[in-house]
Image (cartoon, rainbow, N blue to C red):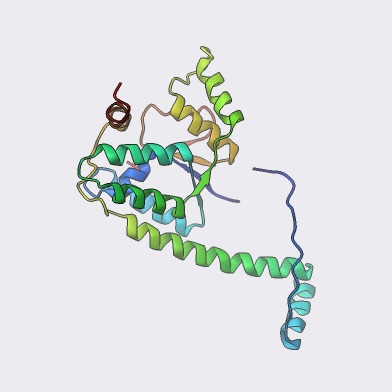
């Protein structure tokens, strides 16, 4: 899904030390302050998102034990639709 | 490089029932993929199919089937199917020179292309994908 990426303007209030650190990081990395903030946010987001998805996977895993079985998926779908719509 | 995995319905069902033959390898594969920061994609048709199949099993209650839909949408990125996708899937199936013969699978293939999937994960031996590699879990 390539294409134009829309940007959104956000205003933040940092304490002096954090603002200085952001400036230093941008200089060291040769990036803009926006890029430094973006990288930091995305890094934390990925960690949080991964933990959230793993927790959902734990909920899912085996939660319908013995209730599905090794079925023919297309046949099961057909049977359900036949019963639902009566054709 | 981003890892974009397209999940077929059978893979989702594998995760729910530990008596299915592919439960263990599929669970390990999906866990490793999430830990590797892969994005898991499904389309809205797959979600409906999963719901139909779960409801066709007498032991699965209506609420259990709904919960499965909810959990899958939370774990995966849901891809919408638009007019262009549907018509492209029809065109591919109509073309006798091409191997596509199942509308549902072809629609998944079209959507997998749309999200630039690096792999289609399915244990369906008949799944047709001329260019996107297919990954089986068992």
Residue at figure coordinates x 49%, y 33% from the top left? B108
Q: Is residue B25 visible?
A: no
Residue at figure coordinates x 58%, y 41% from the top left? B115
Seen as rendered, the residue at the extreme top is B96
User: Is residue B65 shown above or below A86?
Assistant: below
- Quarter of the image holding residue A71? top left
- Residue B37 percent across, percent down from the top left: 51, 57
Residue at figure coordinates x 74%, y 80% from the top left? A13
Residue A30 shown left or right of residue B63 in the figure: right
Q: Quadrant of the C terminus of chain A?
A: top left
Q: Nearer the viewer, residue B23 or B65?
A: B65
- Residue B41 percent across, percent down from the top left: 50, 45
Q: Is residue B58 visible?
A: yes
- Residue A1 percent across, percent down from the top left: 64, 43
Q: Nearer the viewer, residue B44 or B42?
A: B44
Q: Nearer the viewer, residue B138 or A54?
A: A54
Q: Tally the marks.
A: 0
- Quarter of the image holding residue A22? bottom right
Residue A59 shown left or right of residue B45 in the figure: left
Residue B21 shown left or right of residue A13 in the figure: left
Q: Nearer the viewer, residue A61 or B43?
A: B43
User: Is residue A60 shown above or below A44?
Assistant: above
């Amino acid at each position: 899904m390539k294409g134009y990426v829309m940007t959104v303007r956000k205003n933040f209030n940092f304490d002096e030390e954090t603002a200085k650190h952001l400036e230093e990081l941008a200089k060291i990395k040769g990036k803009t302050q926006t890029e430094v903030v973006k990288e930091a946010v995305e890094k934390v987001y990925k960690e949080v998102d991964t933990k959230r998805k793993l927790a959902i996977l734990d909920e899912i895993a085996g939660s319908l034990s013995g209730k599905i079985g090794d079925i023919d998926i297309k046949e099961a779908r057909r049977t359900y639709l036949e019963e639902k719509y009566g054709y | 490089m981003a890892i974009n995995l397209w999940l077929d319905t059978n893979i989702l069902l594998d995760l729910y029932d530990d008596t299915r033959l592919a439960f263990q390898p599929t669970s390990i594969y999906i866990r490793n993929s999430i830990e590797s920061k892969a994005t898991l994609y499904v389309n809205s048709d797959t979600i409906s199919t999963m719901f139909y199949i779960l409801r066709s099993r007498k032991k699965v209650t209506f609420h259990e089937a709904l919960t499965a839909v909810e959990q899958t949408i939370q774990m995966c990125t849901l891809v919408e199917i638009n007019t262009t996708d549907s018509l492209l899937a029809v065109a591919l199936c109509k073309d006798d020179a091409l191997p596509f013969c199942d509308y549902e699978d072809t629609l998944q293939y079209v959507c997998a292309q749309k999200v630039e999937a690096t792999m289609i994960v399915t244990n369906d031996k008949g799944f047709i994908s001329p260019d996107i590699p297919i990954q089986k879990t068992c």
